[in-house]
Amino acid sequence: MTRGLMFGAALTLAACAAGGRSLDDPAVQKLFAMSTPQYYASLNIANQIAQSCPRYTYDAGLDSALNEARNEVGRGSLAAISQRNAIELETDVAQRSFAVKHDVEIPGGDLCAAGDAEILEGSAISAMLVPA
């Protein structure tokens, strides 16, 4: 019985750590399939939304699980080291595009409405946003 309770608790913690999204979720799959620079640019935007909007938190558990899965195919944090300049450039472009798309400023703007729109769209960015 104790083992059953421990197993159940472990499953619950795993679900909470990943915000309830699995790696099979369509929005998560969009992130998984991205190039390394696009992936890190999307994570950056999602993190900025979560930091500026109290309605959302950043899914650090999913971030970790995705990074491990992407490392297995050569597109995770290990690959990012050699692509730092490309990641910085892509992040700048993605932030500008996001700002124009949602008519907000990054950083510093009210990103709650933009986060809401990303959730409704089911975008890759929305995969990392957990409603608070």
Image (cartoon, helix red, strand yellow):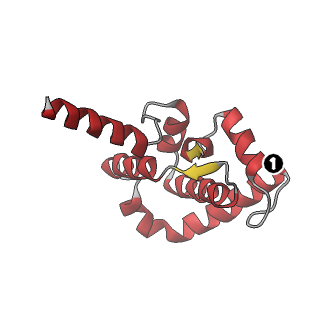
Q: Quadrant of residue 96?
A: bottom right
* Residue denoted by label 1: 101
Q: Position of residue 72 (x, y in %)?
A: 31, 48
In the picture as drawn, the residue positioned furthest to the bottom comes out as 85
In the image, 78: left or right of 47? left
Going by the numbered disc 1, the residue's amino acid type is Lys
**Where residue 113 sits in the image (x, y, percent)?**
78, 46
Which quadrant holds residue 99? bottom right
User: Which percent across, then down, holds residue 130?
Assistant: 57, 44
Q: Where is 128 relative to 22, above or below?
A: below
In this view, the residue farthest toward the right is: 103
Count how many numbered circles sit on residues in the image: 1
Is 49 placed left or right of 57 in the picture? right
Figure check: 36 above or below 27 = below
How far from the left and from the top, in percent, is residue 94?
68, 56
- Observer-nearest of 119 and 42: 119
**Which residue sits at x=63%, y=49%?**
56
Which corner quadrant holds the N terminus? top left
> Toward the viewer: 81 or 3?
3
Q: Is residue 36 left or right of residue 105?
A: left
Q: Residues within 10 Å of mark 1 (few under 14, many from 20)?
A: few
Q: In the image, what residue occupies the spot 85% across and 53% down?
A: 103
Q: Secondary structure at mark 1?
A: helix
Residue, x 44% and y 30% (percent of image)? Answer: 24
Q: Report the residue at 26% width, 32% height from top.
A: 8
Residue 115's place in the image compared with 120, above or below, is below
Left or right: where 87 falls relative to 99: left
